[in-house]
Amino acid sequence: MELRHIRYFLAVAEERNVTRAAERLGIGQPPLSQQIHALEDELGVRLFRRTGHGVVLTEAGESFAADAKRILHDTRLAVENAQSAGRGEIGQFNIGFTGSAAFNPVVSKLIRAYRQAYPNVTLTLAEGNTAQLLAYLDDDRVDVAFVRLGSQSPAGVQFHHIAIEPMKIVLPATHRLAKKRKIALSALAEDPFVMLPREASPTLHDVIVGACREAGFEPIAGQQAPQLSSVVNLVAAEFGVSLVPASVCQIQVEGVVYTDVLGSSISIRLALASRIESTPAKTANFLEKALAFASPID
């Protein structure tokens, strides 16, 4: 039995006349009658009973018509779902992000715009450090990941520019320089720096170390933090000072102050990582939105 046989049957059932059904279907009346007889022979029951004005459904025909309508409906739905999936309009989309990326306003705006444009796509979010997220990307556990862009690009991964953020100094509120609006980084040469381990966030770590070296000193390694929010909390506990992306200033913890760097411009780039070898429609749609929200590169 083919779908066309079901369509033929339903056309005759609705028109109650083989000739009118044939005209509606755009085929000849004799071939349509042959197809209906073949369907009845396959089912082993009579589906129609002839009358003086056409045909009516038998009890078996009534039963078959109800199921036939459902089959056609499910078939149309399957086709529509397949087409929607092919356009990236349904399904699940997995987004990874580093702790620092989560505070950047571009990220929340982009995700909100994507959800509004594709409301039938289910989003799942996974937080991790850069190394974890790139591993997730490689294992297909996430489709894209917001990471801090470093100098190296892992094989099979492409990076799309999102934003460049200035870095801010974060100090304990009791620090001798806490009331300064701007501080030269060299003034912190004797302070321990609270940082994430390099293996967890190589880009952020290298930006901090590179900025200190540029200012003429090697940073004193202080307490290591498991994530960026912990950096702020450890600074509040007077374990040392640090440099953080400007968006992290949203973390308002009692006992810390944020201040600008005097005399130099220190920044860090936020990028969206995706796989090179495969770009499903959902990923392509998200990347298209990302390009619209990305800040220009100076």
Image (tube, helix red, strand yellow):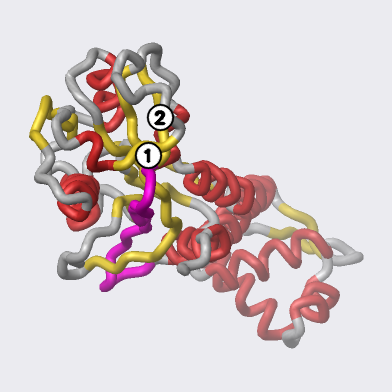
Residue annotated with mark 1: 168
Say what secondary structure mark 1 lies in.
strand
Q: Where residue 79 appears, x then y in whole percent?
A: 54, 63
Q: Residue at x 55, y 58 (%)?
A: 293
* Mark 2, other Cα within 10 Å: few <14 / some 14–19 / many ≥20: many
Residue annotated with mark 2: 258
* Viewer can see residue 244: yes
Q: Where residue 278 appears, x then y in whole percent?
A: 31, 70
* Viewer can see residue 126: no
Say what secondary structure mark 2 lies in.
strand
Compute the Cα span from label 2 to label 1.
6 Å
Q: Which residues are magenta?
A: 261-279
Q: Earlier in the sequence, mark 2 or mark 1?
A: 1
Q: Residue at x 58, y 55 (%)?
A: 77
Where residue 137 sits, quadrant-wise, is bottom left
- Tell me the number on the disc at residue 222: none
Q: Residue at x 35, y 37 (%)?
A: 183
Tags 2 and 1 in contact by the CB under 8 Å rule?
yes
Which is nearer the eye, 180 or 151? 180
Which is nearer the eye, 56 or 139? 139
Q: Disc 2 marks which amino acid?
A: Tyr
Horizontal side, residue 238 vs residue 22: left or right: left
* Mark 1, other Cα within 10 Å: few <14 / some 14–19 / many ≥20: many
Q: Is residue 234 magenta-colored? A: no
Where residue 180 sits, quadrant-wise, is top left
